[in-house]
Amino acid sequence: MVKLVIKGGLKMTFVNLIGRVHNFEQKESEGGVKYTELKMSVMRPYKNYQGNYETDYFRIPLFDANHKKAQDYLRKGMGIAIKGRLEMSHWVDETDKNRANVNIIAEQLFFLPKEVDETIADLKE
């Protein structure tokens, strides 16, 4: 869910995701900063035309306290929630084409209680 808030001419994007840990891996940036690359699966809250729920996957880097929490407590398949914001990155690729990407910047990582985790699992049935 993304919502746009406009106050005094400022525009900000917020994102809240609830889903499951698909996988995660500790990495290190070129500058030596350790972080966790999280791949999160999020089931859409509605069925497609074939009557099935579809799942989207998001790559989310976790830094600082969120990196520490991820390395200490995450496990594949567990229910989590991410509160964060969207940022655009722009670059020129090796063929001189302008490129852009939307990045999810995680500000908070929440572990879902087992009851919520089980409810999400029940929705798949």
Image (spheres, rainbow, N blue to C red):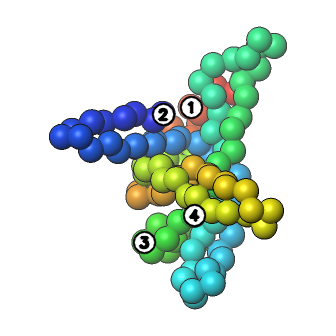
Give the residue pinned by disc 4.
61
Q: Residues within 10 Å of mark 4 (few under 14, many from 20)?
A: many
**CB under 8 Å between callouts 2 and 3?**
no
- Tell me: 15 left or right of 43: left
Q: CA distance from mark 2 to mark 4?
A: 19 Å
The answer to whether 43 is drawn above or below residue 70 in the figure is above
Amino acid beneath label 2: Met
Task: Give the percent coordinates (x, y) of residue 69.
Answer: 49, 69
Which mark's residue is nearer the viewer, 1 or 4?
Answer: 4
Q: CA distance from mark 3 to mark 4?
A: 12 Å
Task: First in sequence, mark 2 or 3: give its number.
Answer: 2
Amino acid beneath label 4: Pro
The answer to whether 56 is drawn above or below residue 90 in the figure is above
Q: CA distance from mark 1 to mark 4?
A: 26 Å
Task: First in sequence, mark 1 or 3: give its number.
Answer: 3
Location of residue 96 by image quarter: bottom right
Give the residue pinned by disc 1.
119
Location of residue 91 by image quarter: bottom right
Give the residue pinned by disc 3.
65
Give the residue pinned by disc 2.
1
93 or 112, which lies in front? 93
- Tell me: 58 left or right of 85: right
Q: CA distance from mark 2 to mark 1?
A: 19 Å
Mark 1: secondary structure: helix
Task: First in sequence, mark 2 or 1: give its number.
Answer: 2
The residue drawn where x is 32% and y is 42% is 11
The residue drawn where x is 58% and y is 58% is 90
- Residue 45 in view in this figure: yes
Q: CA distance from mark 1 to mark 3?
A: 28 Å
Which mark's residue is nearer the viewer, 2 or 3?
Answer: 2
The residue most toward the front is 96
The residue drawn where x is 57% and y is 63% is 61
